[in-house]
RNA sequence: GCCCCCGUGGUCUAGCGGUUAGGACAUCGCCCUUUCAAGGCGUCGGCAGGAGUUCGACUCUCCUCGGGGGUGCCA
């Protein structure tokens, strides 16, 4: 009885998916899946210069990497294609003809340059500029001169006066405009290409889109689109305008704020499910206090009603916290594979290395201490490089405290005869406290600093297993000699 | 300028006329501990301001202020 819900994601393929766009895609995806609807992927590529095939490819890869797939549209096909605007020119032109014949639009015999300078001079004189006025002043002579120069007129849509227009927005409620606030606007350029506000209407109508979920920046132009829906007798869809994602300085997130694209976050070592989860929480929340959701849970819980109206600041610290959580939970094999490039770059391992058992063990030991995959180069360094023993004053102090001498001496003596297996080492480490009669802190802190140069890190057993007997004893000896020169065993 | 949207701690948010204004990230601190992490506990900190309406406003109305968006032959 209810008609099939159809939403669309219509990016302009400029190469990279902006975080804000990704969030729009995400909400469309969640909404479609939640309602058993269809997500259509359409390419708004009328701006041909920017829309290279390469750009389209990277863009779609980023979307898929994030975990968003679509049911219909570009690369998938469907009943309402083609799904690239550049391939739909006949359609746009067809409806232009209708508009023209019904006198709901008109041809403008001025070139773009002429319009520019006219607009400037009008504004200089403080007068309002409008296409309508220009059209009224247009003469037969002008038209002929224009045609003789082999120029094509732009097409302008006629905005009717005194129309009240109300957008019933699913997140904002009723938003009212008066048509007098809008002037006639171009819908097809001199060069024959349609303008966004026009093409999007034709596409949305023909593709039977039922809900348009997009960023708030489009809200003010929605009346223009509604005028066209009405003029062509297309039933208008429902709208839902979600608010913008802001940078910490509360302005629109842009390049000068650093990383703004999905691809950049991937390169920085974020996991797709972390970004997915975080983005979903930017402007939407479930009624309980949960923060971690699987994709399925999100699909289950997502509704437009619980989308927040206020804009949200993108907080990379919270993203990192979330990423840390997902990395800790992820399996070693995956993290290792993702970390491989970073380790290769550090020349820790060979170019064509795979995840050996040893690497897997290392990853297993350190993954709880990573915020991003890239952190592997920090947290795994003690296993691949000789460490710099003296770090902070505090660490130095710990190494030099009297008990440390006892600890190191004991370790160096005993370890020689310990078999380096998990069971043996566990047992050995557990017995240290009783053997040395020292508080845990006095034992384990210096040990860790001697082994990895920091008092925080993976479990001692894991560290020692990975380093191996020789290096462990070597590092303890080094710590002993440096902190207590002249000590003889 | 005009039009539109928004305004709960530094940040993300819950709240939908009566709450000690709840949770999360970050900060700082404590506890626990076989270190660290994790976990547990706590500190700091908020309804932009002003008028109404009401017995009672974070919640409703209006104004002001602040932020954002639109006003292109960009999308």
Image (cartoon, rainbow, N blue to C red):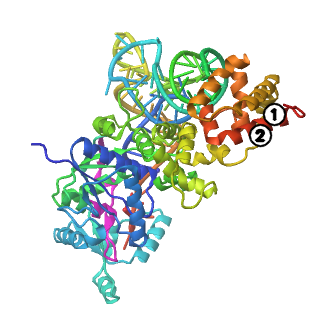
Residue B16 image point, x, y percent: 32, 23
Q: Is residue A429 above or below residue A57?
A: above
Quadrant of residue A485 within the rendered picture: top right
Callout 1 secondary element: helix
Give left or right: position of A85 versus A278: left
| Image quarter in which the C terminus of chain A is found | top right
Residue A108 image point, x, y percent: 31, 74
Quadrant of residue B15 within the rendered picture: top left
Of label 2 and label 1, which has the lower sequence position?
2
Residue A474 image point, x, y percent: 75, 40
Specify the label residue A389 is tagged with: 2
The answer to the question of whether label 2 and label 1 lie on touching residues, with beta carbons closer than 8 A, is no
Q: What residue appears at the point 79 percent right and 22 percent down from the top-left corner?
A: A403
Callout 2 secondary element: loop
For this rendering, which residue is in front, A223 or A184?
A223
How packed is label 2: few (under 14 Cα within 10 Å), some, or many (20 or more)? many
Give left or right: position of A11 versus A424: left
Q: What residue appears at the point 49 percent right and 46 percent down from the top-left corner?
A: A335
Whether residue A160 appears in this view of the structure is no
Q: What residue appears at the point 61 percent right and 58 percent down from the top-left corner?
A: A345
For this rendering, which residue is in front, B73 or A134?
B73
Q: Are marks 2 and 1 on the same chain?
A: yes
Q: What residue appears at the point 41 percent right and 60 percent down from the top-left corner?
A: A59
Magenta residues?
A: A173-200
Spatial separation of the CA atoms under disc 2 and disc 1? 11 Å
Q: Is residue A46 above or below residue A335?
A: below
Whether residue A177 appears in this view of the structure is yes
Specify the label residue A480 is tagged with: 1
The question of residue A186 being in magenta is answered with yes
**Disc 1 chain ID:** A
The question of residue A397 being in magenta is answered with no
For this rendering, which residue is in front, A354 or A271?
A354
């Amino acid at each position: 009885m209810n008609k099939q819900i159809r939403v669309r994601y219509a990016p302009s393929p400029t190469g990279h998916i902006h975080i804000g766009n990704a969030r729009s895609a995400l909400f469309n995806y969640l909404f479609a899946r939640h309602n058993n609807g269809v997500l259509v992927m359409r390419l708004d590529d009328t701006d041909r210069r920017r829309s290279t095939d390469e750009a389209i490819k990277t863009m779609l890869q980023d979307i898929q990497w994030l975990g968003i797939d679509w049911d219909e549209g570009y690369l998938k096909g469907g009943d309402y294609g083609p799904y690239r605007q550049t391939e739909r020119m006949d359609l746009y032109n067809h409806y232009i003809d209708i508009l023209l014949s019904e006198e709901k639009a008109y041809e403008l015999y001025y070139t773009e340059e002429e319009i520019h300078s006219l607009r400037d001079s009008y504004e200089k004189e403080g007068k309002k500029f409008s296409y309508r006025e220009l059209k009224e002043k247009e003469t037969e002579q002008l038209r002929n001169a224009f045609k003789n120069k082999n120029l094509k007129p732009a097409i302008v849509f006629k905005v009717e006066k005194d129309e009240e227009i109300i957008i019933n927005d699913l997140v904002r409620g009723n938003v009212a405009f008066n048509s007098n606030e809008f002037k006639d606007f171009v819908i097809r350029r001199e060069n024959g290409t349609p303008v966004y506000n026009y093409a999007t209407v034709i596409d949305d109508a023909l593709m039977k889109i039922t809900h348009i979920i997009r960023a708030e920046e489009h809200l003010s132009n929605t009346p223009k689109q509604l005028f066209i829906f009405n003029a062509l007798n297309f039933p208008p869809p429902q709208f839902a305008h979600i608010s913008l994602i802001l940078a910490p300085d509360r302005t629109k997130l842009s390049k000068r704020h650093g990383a703004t694209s999905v691809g950049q976050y991937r390169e920085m070592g974020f996991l797709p499910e972390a970004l997915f989860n975080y983005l979903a929480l930017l402007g939407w929340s479930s009624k309980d206090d949960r923060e971690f959701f699987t994709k399925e849970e999100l699909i289950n819980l997502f509704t437009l009603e619980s989308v927040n109206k206020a804009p949200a600041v993108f907080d990379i610290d919270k993203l990192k916290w979330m990423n840390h959580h997902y990395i800790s939970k992820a399996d070693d094999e995956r993290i290792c594979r993702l970390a491989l490039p970073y380790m290769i770059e550090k020349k820790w391992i060979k170019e064509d290395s795979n995840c050996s058992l040893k690497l897997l063990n290392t990853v297993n030991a350190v993954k709880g201490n990573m915020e991003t995959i890239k952190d592997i180069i920090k947290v795994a360094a003690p296993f691949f490089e000789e460490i710099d023993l003296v770090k902070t004053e505090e660490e130095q102090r710990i190494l030099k405290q009297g008990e440390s001498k006892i600890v190191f001496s004991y370790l160096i003596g005993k370890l020689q005869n310990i078999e380096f297996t998990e069971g043996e080492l566990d047992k050995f480490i557990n017995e240290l406290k009783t053997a040395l009669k020292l508080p845990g802190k006095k034992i384990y802190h210096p040990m860790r600093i001697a082994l990895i140069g920091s008092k925080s890190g993976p479990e001692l057993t894991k560290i020692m297993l990975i380093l191996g007997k020789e290096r462990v004893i070597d590092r303890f000896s080094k710590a002993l000699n440096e902190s207590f020169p002249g000590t003889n065993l």
